Image (cartoon, rainbow, N blue to C red):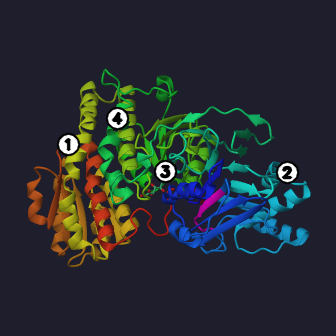
Amino acid sequence: MCGIVGYTGHEEACGIIIDGLKRLEYRGYDSAGVALQQQGRLVVRKKKGKIEDLEKFIGSERLTGTTGIGHTRWATHGAPSDVNAHPHTSSDGRIAVVHNGIVENYVELRQKLADEEKIEFRTETDTEVIAQMIGVNYRKNGGNLEDAVYDAVQEMRGAYAIGVIAADTPDRIVAYRKDAPLIAGLGGDCKFIASDIPALLKYVNDIYLIENDEMVVCTPDSVRIYDENRRPVRREVMKVNWSIEDAEKGGYEHFMLKEIHEQPKAVQDTLLRRIDDNGRICLDGISLTKEDLQNITKIYIVACGTAYHAGLIGKYAIEKMARIPVEIDVASEFRYRDPVIDDKTLFIAISQSGETLDTLAALREARSHGARILSVCNVVGSSVARESDDVFYTWAGPEIAVASTKAYTTQLVCMYLIALYLGDLTGNISREYYDHILEELMAMPDKIRQTLEKAPEIEELARHLYNRTQVFFIGRGVDSAVALEGSLKLKEISYINSFAIAAGELKHGTIALMEPETIVIALATQDRLFEKMYSNIVEVKARMAHVVSIAKEGSDKIEAESTEVIYIPQCDDEVTPILTVIPLQLFAYYVAKIKGEDIDKPRNLAKSVTVE
Ligand code: F6R
């Protein structure tokens, strides 16, 4: 969702800010803008559309100024438009604000400003209310920007991160965080604020993670952090070990394709962090003791979207290996019902970004009932990671494409490792089985590589099928969970209406939709369910469906009933999802590419969903 970048230093700020904004494009946005301090005044340029549209709008105009803020907006209050784009300014033009999040009480604050200060609003946004409030405070307090910001946020309800500059407070950015991501970057003689690490990787590797209810004041030489009572806070510097190459396309046409191809390494990195020299899973850095785990009677897995789909596989694995009951829910539902949860519950939150608001709210809800929180997270220092008792990191590196790929496969690895660890601890699995599944996992990077070699075959398939309007994904057991992920991938980037269903459910209604040439992608990788799945394929084939089957090498029988078959390497039924999803990711990618869609930034979607 919205992205914030701010710079104060000795170089021209405009280019640095726009470069940072480009690296936040993945968050999703519909307009962009910058505000710069120029000798006692503020210059604001903003535009609906892409950052390139903003650059064109700025054109050859030389926007000088060594302190500034920039923003990519994902519209919430007010349609995407030039006027609603950020930064927003106070009526006197002395204050500029960028904002990520929502001010829930903005209507009443707006009314108050209109009644008491006779402010005439120019936009429909909640952000203009912030700019006007700070503007009024600043004028009344004689030009103290920090006080003006602090006093304004005392009146604001909601989840937000803001960055503020003033025309006549040179070389200073004041920022505030409440439940929306914010970091500060530490260069030698320049400082930054940003919503996420990739925005700053080109310039700094040292950052401060800003906590909730903290105010940050950046000047070229210093970053000061204050808590909600304005007491100075000491913060450890966090060294970021991602490189700028990790956040660039590296010769691939799209981030999504690059990230699909990074999966062998991402899976390997995630495994190697957790397997010691004796071939045992190690939970270094995780404070859950054996006793804590033995006390657990129930596990709750909660997540959104693709992360939820990884959780579904986690449920299969944990229940099978550890025989502990697992409930799973999407975070937006979990947080509003009355879940049965207590201090014997282990709550597992899965989130790539660690900033998904619903997941975070669900985590807080679980904590308030006494649950122990373990998160599976990709972004070190993100809100979900910080609010968890323990974090099992995925080592996927930055995931930039909106459609999640390598985060999913690394989340699967984490879920298998957690399941195996618990299975071993509860004595439900033998040493042989434990070793066998670990060996299967260790073989995955190579098997993913082999599966990726099918890319030309899958591209060809996409070329034949890209113009269909309806696709069904079916499967049994873990394949039914992977079917959901394959369907989500296809619909989110190609806009084809796709639908996933457990194959056994077809007869209970959905088979009515089968017509000649309906595409059915049938996942048939489960040896123990193969015959059942085969019958389902026969059923849809009898209705003249175009069946693309995904099966393990050696399942040749399936060819008779399928229009096409894509084979994945042989592996244990339990861990097939790591491989089965690869052709589905590639299929979605190539269909979207052939259709000419904006693959990395699909319409209406944001990478990091920081509002409800
Ligand atoms: C789909 C996708 C989303 C995310 C979901 C949760 O490709 O990326 O469905 O999985 O928004 O995001 P995180 O994992 O950041 O909490």
The residue that mark 2 highlights is 144
Q: Is residue 493 above or below residue 566?
A: below
Seen from the viewer's position, the closer of residues 252 and 446 is 252
x and y percentages locating residue 143 in the rendered image: 86, 54
Please tell me which residue is depicted at 31% across the width and 20% down the height of the picture: 278
Q: What residue type is labelled 2?
A: Asn
Cα distance between the residues tagged 2 and 1: 65 Å
x and y percentages locating residue 15 in the rendered image: 57, 57
Please tell me which residue is depicted at 46% across the width and 24% down the height of the picture: 290
Which of the marked residues, 2 or 1, is nearer the chain's N terminus?
2
The residue that mark 1 highlights is 571
The residue that mark 3 highlights is 303
Which of the marked residues, 4 or 3, is nearer the chain's N terminus?
4
Q: In this rendering, which labeled residue sits more in front, label 2 or label 4? A: 2
Residue 65 picture quarter: bottom right
Marks 2 & 3, CB-CB < 8 Å contact: no
x and y percentages locating residue 525 in the rendered image: 21, 51
Q: In this rendering, which labeled residue sits more in front, label 2 or label 3? A: 2
Residue 162 picture quarter: bottom right
Q: Main secondary structure of the magenta part?
A: strand
Residue 2 picture quarter: bottom right
x and y percentages locating residue 553 in the rendered image: 13, 50
Marks 4 & 3, CB-CB < 8 Å contact: no
Circle 4 — which element?
helix
- Mark 2 sits near ligand 1, with its Cβ under 8 Å away: no
Point out the stretch of residues depicted in magenta.
69-76
